[in-house]
Image (cartoon, grey):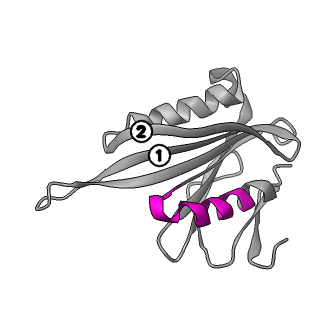
Amino acid sequence: MNEEFENFSIYGFSIDYPKECRVEFNPKGRRESGDVVFHFPERNKIFLSWGDLEKATKRFQTIEAHADNSLETVKKTRNVKNFEKVSSDTVNVRSHKAAYNHVRLEEMTAGFFTGGRAVPRDACSVHVHCPDSSRYFVIYALFPHESVEKQEKAFMGMTKSLKCH
């Protein structure tokens, strides 16, 4: 493990996260499904969600279809404008084929006096289906465009460290 990272482990899986992060576990999370948020000091966040693989594979024939559905959900969010896919790739996570996506969008902030403004953001996601643990995992992050290089490095470090089974 990298000296700049610590290990988060729960329910038989683990991920390394930057030491600078504050970890927030969703109190409604359980062994079958849940999520955890890794908060960076500059207010950026990386999320890890998990759920029942059987439920996911009933809805989605492939890992790419699962990832595309997540992207469509983000695209249809009412405060998202100018959604653009920057890159899409297949990556390997613990011997599993995983779907990686990087998108660029504008997030419309609410503002009564300012009328709202468009904030450029980058979002990355990795979807993993793990038959060994009978779970799917989604790692995703949304960061300001100007910090994408630093945050994507942390994001990919976390992704590569995921031990799903």
Q: Work out whether 71 lies above or below 165.
A: above
Q: Which residue is at 71% across, 24% downward?
A: 62
Kind of residue at badge 2: Phe
Q: Position of residue 63 (x, y in %)?
A: 70, 30
Q: Position of residue 9 (x, y in %)?
A: 77, 64
Membership of 144 in magenta stretch: yes
Badge 1 or badge 2: first in the primary sequence: 2
Q: Position of residue 52 (x, y in %)?
A: 70, 37
Mark 1 — residue?
A: 104
Q: Which residue is at 73% across, 34% downward?
A: 53
**Across the whole image, how many numbered discs are drawn on residues?**
2
Q: Magenta stretch? A: 142-157
- Whether residue 147 is visible, yes or no, is yes
Mark 1 closeness class: few <14, some 14–19, many ≥20 residues within 10 Å: many
Q: Quadrant of the N terminus?
A: bottom right
Q: Which residue is at 52% across, 50% downward?
A: 123
Q: Secondary structure at mark 1?
A: strand
Q: Work out whether 112 lies above or below 95.
A: below
Mark 2 closeness class: few <14, some 14–19, many ≥20 residues within 10 Å: some
| Residue in the foreground of this view, choosing between 153 and 7 | 153
Kind of residue at badge 1: Arg
- State yes or no: discs 1 and 2 in contact (Cβ < 8 Å): yes
Apparent side of residue 81 relative to residue 105 in the rendered image (left or right): left
Mark 2 — residue?
A: 83
Q: Secondary structure at mark 2?
A: strand
